[in-house]
Image: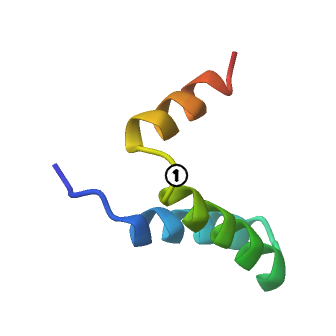
Amino acid sequence: MEQWSNNACLGYIRAALERKGWSNERIREVVGGVYYEFDFKTIEEAKRIYENSFD
């Protein structure tokens, strides 16, 4: 099993948004927002938020 990496997570986000044609400015906003949340959410909390977003 690979080890969790905040930078890898941010890389996935950046890659997805680049693929969708987002501007660097918008990508920086989103990546900055996610980076900020790393300090306030545990991995389990973030997982629950994601899993509950499909209800």
Residue 50 vertical placement versus 21 (above, below): above
- Dot 1: few (<14), some (14–19), or many (≥20) neighbours within 10 Å? few
Q: Quadrant of residue 32?
A: bottom right
Instruction: Tell me if 53 is positioned left or right of 42 in this view.
Output: right
Instruction: Tell me if 14 is positioned left or right of 10 in this view.
Output: right
Looking at the rendered image, the quarter that the C terminus falls into is top right
Q: Position of residue 14 (x, y in %)?
A: 61, 71
Residue 9 vertical placement versus 48 (above, below): below
Residue occupying the point 29% across, 57% down:
4
Q: Residue furthest bottom?
A: 24
Residue 6 vertical placement versus 55 (above, below): below
Q: Amino acid at mark 1?
A: Phe
Q: Compare residues 32 and 51 and report the one nearer the observer.
A: 32
Q: Residue furthest front?
A: 40
Residue occupying the point 77% across, 84% down:
24
Residue 33 vertical placement versus 7 (above, below): above
Residue occupying the point 16% across, 48% down:
1
Which SS class for mark 1? loop
Residue occupying the point 56% across, 67% down:
35
Q: Position of residue 20 (x, y in %)?
A: 77, 65
The total number of labels drawn is 1
Q: Position of residue 7 (x, y in %)?
A: 42, 72
- Residue on which the image places disc 1: 40
